[in-house]
Structure formats: C-alpha cells, structure tokens
Amino acid sequence: MSLLDAPPAPHYFSPEHVQFRDSLREWVSREITPNATAWDEAGGFPRALYKKASAIGLLGLDYPEQYGGTPADLFYHLILSEELARPGAGGVAASLMSHSIGLPPVKNFGSAALKARVIPPVLAGDKIAALAVTEPSGGSDVAALKTTAIRDGDHYVVNGEKVFITSGMRADFITVAVRTDPANKGPGGISALLVDGDTPGLTRTRLDKMGWWASDTAHLRFDHCRVPVANLIGEENKGFKTFMTNFNGERLGMAAQAVGYAQVCFDEALDWARQRHTFGQALSERQVIRHKLMDMLRAIDVARCHVYDLAWAQQHNHGDPNLRVARIAMAKVESTKCMQFCADSAVQILGGMGFMRGTKSERIYREVKVMMIGGGSEEIMKDLAARQLGI
C-alpha cells in the first residue's frame, strides 16, 4: 500500500505526467536505490550520475530547448522531488539537483551570452551549478549579507565567505549573492554574480554533517576574486528579488520532497510491521502499531494535498501573490514536520533495526533537520508568512 502508487488525481496529473513518473521511478530504482547506502558511507557519488540523469531529461526540466532543456510544468517538478526521495538518500538528491537552485537566476535574469555559456553544459551533465547565499554571520536574512563585490574596471573584486553550500566542493558555476553597494546595508545593495569554480582566490573547505553524507557541502572563501562584469546576473543592486523568487521555488520543492521522504518511512515501517512477529503475532496486527501507521498516513495525506493544491495555485497564478508566498512557507513547515513525525515513528516501529545504519528510516531520521532548516528555518518561515499576511 502506498499513496505514491495510488492513481493520481486527474486534475493535477495528465497521462504524460504519469508516464514520466513511471519512467523516472524505474530509473531511480536502477541507478540510485541499489547504491544509496554505499554512496552515503563513501561521502559522495560518481560524477557520472549527472550524465545519466541528463540522458533521461531530469536536469533539463523546464529549461528552453535551445539550451538542451525540456518545457515542463510545475507538477513534473513535484514528481521529480517525490521519486528522487524513494531511495531515502537526501544527499544524493541534493547534490544531483543543486542546479535547480543555482541555475534559475541565470535562466531568468542572465544575459543571452551568460545563458549560452552556462546552461547547456550543466543540463548536459558536464558541469555542476550551485547557489551560495548563506554566510557564517547569517542565513535567511539575505538583506544583511556581508560578501562584497566592488567594481574595478571590467571586473568585480569579490571578498567574503559563504557556508553550507550544497555541491560547493565540485561546482563549476556558483551563483553568489553579493553586496555591490557597500553603502547600502539593506536589500537595495545586493546583486547576483556568477563565479566560475576555477576563479583564483576561491578556496573551498568540505564540511562534515549529521546527514546528507553523499552530498558535498562546503565553506567557500573569496579572497580578492576577480569576476568579469559580464557575469552579473540581472541588474546591479537589484538582486534581492532574484534570490527571494528563487527561495519560493526551492521551498515548494523541499515541501514535496519532505512528503516523499515521509512516505518512504511509512512504506518501510509497514513492510517491517507485517514481517516482524512478537509473541506470536505480527506487529501490524497490534492496534497500537496500526494506529501509529494511520497517524503517519494521515499526516502524509494532509501534507501532500497541501503541496498539490499550492502547486496548482502557483502554476495558474491563482489568488493573491502574498498569500501564495505565505502558503509556500507554511507548506514547507507542514511537510517537514510530517517528515520528522514519520521518521521518528518509523524508527520506533522498526525498533533495534531502526537504529541500524542501512535502513532508509535511520538515514532519513538523521536528515530531517537539514530539511527543517535549509531553505529557511521553521521559525523564519512562520515569521515570513505572518509578514505576508499583515499579522
């Protein structure tokens, strides 16, 4: 039994969506699931996986065909998030799809020359893109960032630090939030700048984490890095809106992904409860366990319906934009809480086995917190929603 296996709601998913889900599920079960534990223990996955993902069109969803992409609506992205969650390996999904947060600013605001240089090799799986916004002094408060990019002729000189950067160790292109007007301490002095990975003065340090072991996460330092003015994304000093728009897409994707991980925990817990016997009876036959499973399923159903409804509203530009921003923030909170609840419940149902490395639930249990913090913490999301609603 799995809600992911249930017939999709026809008003959300077309036959083409269903066909995409089926093909993606088969690819994930073949290319990622058998290797997920080994890659996690190794602290990374082969770079060749990007080429394989490109070959079936995963990297190019919703990018123009002229750059090697495939036009796609928002529900293709939700399917992608759900299906990549099936192996229960957040680190693999995070790094494999780091371009989904690093590349949209280039696609949406970059010059024609910058798009032509950067987007095709990333979608082809030859290059890796990342996003660098968070700094040691702060994360979600983008308007207070300290990394500077000072114009010097036809270059910007970049100085500062970024931390917790997904794919930060091996990214070839890094979309960086910088302050181009040091006199403006607020959002008005922020710009988006593409920094090439081989830029002199850029150094990277790998970070050790509680979870997402298969994802390289880095601390970046920019020491007088000279970046061509041609690498400016959008207009100078008008990058704040670029990053805020980017965050909305990231948060909705994380909400869908969190529901997917919650579903994985339910499926593993149900399978174990049916197999495991105590005192001559299967765990699944005990009322207390059945109730735990139903509580998990209820939370998953509520969170998924919230995400799907919000995706529909976003895709059709339905309703007040401020309300949609608030609902996206709340969807991330709801979905990650669902993931947390289901991971905890699954580990409890699995008992000793849930404490063992190699089970999906154990790995997801360790990865819950990055989902609740990354892209905007629960506390920041609630505050953002309240401001959008005038509360």
Image (cartoon, rainbow, N blue to C red):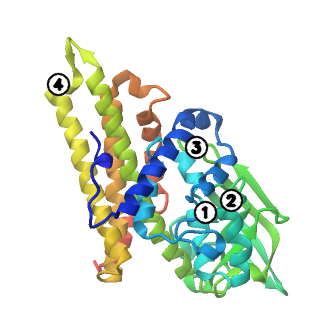
Calculate the distance from the C-alpha at mark 2 to the C-alpha at mark 4. 48 Å
Above or below, 148 relative to 163: below
Residue located beneath label 3 in the image: 209
Give whichever of discs 4 and 3 has the lower sequence position.
Answer: 3
Can residue 138 be seen? no
Q: Residue at the location (55% across, 72% down)?
A: 142
Question: Element at badge 4?
Answer: helix
Q: Residue 379: x percent and y percent?
A: 38, 62
Calculate the distance from the C-alpha at mark 2 to the C-alpha at mark 3. 21 Å
Q: Residue 8: x percent and y percent?
A: 29, 56
Q: Residues within 10 Å of mark 2 (few under 14, many from 20)?
A: many
Give whichever of discs 1 and 4 has the lower sequence position.
Answer: 1
Type of the residue with mark 4: Glu
Type of the residue with mark 2: Ile
For residue 99, the mark is 1
Calculate the distance from the C-alpha at mark 1 to the C-alpha at mark 3. 21 Å
Do the residues bearing badges 2 and 3 touch, measured as CB atoms within 8 Å?
A: no
For residue 285, the mark is 4
Above or below, 71 relative to 123: below
Type of the residue with mark 3: Lys
Query: Which of 103 and 158 lies nearest the eye of the viewer?
Result: 103
Give whichever of discs 2 and 1 has the lower sequence position.
Answer: 1
Q: Residue 340: x percent and y percent?
A: 36, 45
Residue located beneath label 2 in the image: 128
Q: Where, quadrant-wise, is the N terminus in this rendering?
A: top left
Calculate the distance from the C-alpha at mark 1 to the C-alpha at mark 4. 45 Å
Do the residues bearing badges 2 and 1 touch, measured as CB atoms within 8 Å?
A: yes
Can residue 110 be seen? yes
